[in-house]
Amino acid sequence: MSGKTLFEKVWNAHVVVPETTDTPAVLYVDLHLVHEVTSPQAFSELRERGLPLRRPDRMLATLDHSTPTLPTNADGSRPYANAEAQAQVTQLETNCREFGVELHGWDSADRGIVHVIGPELGATQPGMTIVCGDSHTSTHGAFGALAFGIGTTEVGHVMATQCLLQRKPKTMAIHVDGQLPPGIGAKDLILHIIGTIGVDGGTGYVLEYRGAAIEALSMDERMTVCNMSIEAGARAGLIAPDETTFAWLKGRPRVPQGAAWDAAVKRWRALRSDDDATYDHQVRIDATAVKPTVTYGTHPGMAIAMDAPVPAATNAQERRALEYMKSEAGKPMQGTPVDVVFVGSCTNSRLSDLREAANVLRGRRVADGVRMLVVPGSEAVRRDAEREGLHQIFTAAGAEWRVPGCSMCIAMNGDLAQPGQLVVSTSNRNFEGRQGKGARTVLASPATAAASALAGRIADPREYLVEVAA
Amino acid sequence: MKPITRIHSRTAVLADENIDTDRIIPARFLTTTTREGLGKLCFHDWRYQADGSDNPAFPLNQPQAQGCSIVVAGRNFGCGSSREHAPWALLDYGVRAVLCSEIADIFRGNALKNGLLAIVIDELEHRWLLKHPGIELVIDVRGQFIALPDGGRIPFRLEPFARHCLLNGVDQLGYLLQHTDAITHYEQQEKAA
């Protein structure tokens, strides 16, 4: 019998009822993350049917999507984008109170983007199954957890039964050989991977990122990589837990402590694909060939090195995408004038992301006419960043330092770009109108975002980092 | 959910590939706390002009698309976010089925759970349907085929459980709740481990 992949090990350990030809598996969920946008209809459904939550102790809720990132008004009220956004937040507060769910709301010192606080609190652990009504739940795969986004109907299923009906997905190994060159980060790598396998290259698969370049990544970087698995169509991305994972998790509030910690680590060490495990598909990526990478079109698969020429459109959709973006075939994205720069989102709002941006910005000024927003992923990130003085680097450079939330990644809280504006964004989606109706999004790393803010044009961050080193 | 056995309609075509859920319903409309009334927001930024009038360039605004409840869409329809607001909006807008050579995973699952037939067909037939909007089709869920006006058939395969639920109007939560004993047993074993 051949060995098992990491995915199969986690999957098998959570099967309550095995799948048959006629019926999907009943799969147990260890952790259910909740936010205000995709949960209200599920709570309503439970209420209508008179059903309780099966395991409120396995739920963790936060406010992030519809929340303003500006500080409170003078009268103590919050500057919501509109009454509906406020009502949605109030609804989650009410639901959590009524159903007994732990909510990291406005008064919590741990509030933040759901995919940032899960790991921070140690709620995310290797070998778990984790779901949330949010496609970027794949982020938690960085810890060797099987984590994926679900719809609101399924949110209701998990609330009532702690289980989901699931067909076993296929597996794809993405081997990343070699090491990333200096100044090239996890965001460049994942954009490069999606550009290689395509926006639908992962559909039907769970991805496992492996190889020397992946092992060398920090946890923050691994989260950036796994976060964007969905942008290749894969519901989940996994990385086997290792010493880096254990060191990062140790001592966090929700992880086991003392002898229980040692026992857990011993268990977690087995969470890796066996040498003789087989995958349904395999891809090899050369880390040494990755350059600062950006998108040039209207989905994340349209990604290239910033100094490479934009490919000519081969069909009507690509023509429409280039037209929308005003990207010119044959010309590189590097040098394109920039209006707005956004550093934040569940992809790149952790402390190391902010440091990366700050290293480029330190002692410099954002170009005239460029608006730059820096939005930390959580209150904890905000505290840590302020302790290091990063906020002063940002504000001295002319950037806005905001309160945690999803902000301009999804642009439903009032943080948005104007029609036609070009945004260099560290977020995960460059769909038409994603950052505001008519806004043009170029996805990039925090370093590239910061360099582009300084230059007023899409710029290679290495030019700025070399100066610092010299 | 009401049982769905067949859908009979002319087709409308949205030929773009990778129509993401932000295009189906922009995120700024997700502040709603109900699932009703989203049809008027469906494809909002594509469907309406700046002054709120219908955009004549949006394929589903064209006269021949009126009354069509089957949409033939370009490859990888529904990619992007997990928002179930996308199928809710499509259904409320009057779309009952989406035919495509590839449909994003989360969207497909959400759609089928709401009675929106998200059906994957072969590339060759998909290409043909994209080129022939307005064709009269009958989607037969039980027989798993699409009947063409000339008597031809396009076969498809739905995940058997999803098909069973569509045909019988099965409430999936009700089905899951039938496994409560097994779930309790699983939790007890997990606790003991």
Image (cartoon, coloured by chain):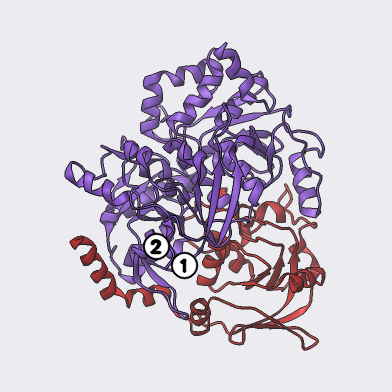
Q: Residue B118 in the image: state x and y as whole percent.
A: 61, 70
Residue A160 picture quarter:
bottom left
* SS type, badge 2: helix
CB atoms of marks 2 and 1 within 8 Å: yes
Q: x%, y% of residue A155? A: 41, 61
Residue B104, given in percent of the width and then of the height, sits at: 59, 61
Chain A display color: purple
On the rendered structure, is A380 left or right of A396? left
- The image's mark for residue A50 is none
Q: Residue at x 48, y 37 (%)?
A: A221
The residue depicted at 79 percent of the width and 65 percent of the height is: B62
Pointer 2 indicates a residue of which chain?
A
The amino acid type, in three-letter code, at marker 1 is Lys
The secondary structure type at the circle numbered 1 is loop
Residue type at the position of mark 2: Trp
> In this figure, which residue is indicated by the disc labeled 1?
A168
**Residue B93 in picture, x, y percent from top left:** 63, 66
Q: Is residue A394 left or right of residue B71?
A: left
The relative height of residue B65 versus residue A101 in the rendered view (above or below) is below
Say above or below: A175 vs A148. Answer: above
**Does residue B190 appear to the left or right of B83 in the view shown?**
left
Q: Is residue A176 something one can see in this rendering? A: yes
Quadrant (top left, top right, bottom left, bottom right) of the C terminus of chain A = top right
Q: Which residue is mark 2?
A: A11
Disc 2 or 1, which lies upstream in sequence?
Answer: 2
Q: Colour of chain B?
A: red
Estimate how packed mark 1 is, as few (under 14), some (14 to 19) or many (20 or more) residues with alpha carbons within 10 Å: some
Q: Quadrant of residue A111?
A: top left
- CA distance for labels 2 and 1: 8 Å
Same-chain status of marks 2 and 1:
yes
Q: Residue at x 37, y 26 (%)?
A: A384
Query: A466 or A266: nearer the eye?
Result: A266
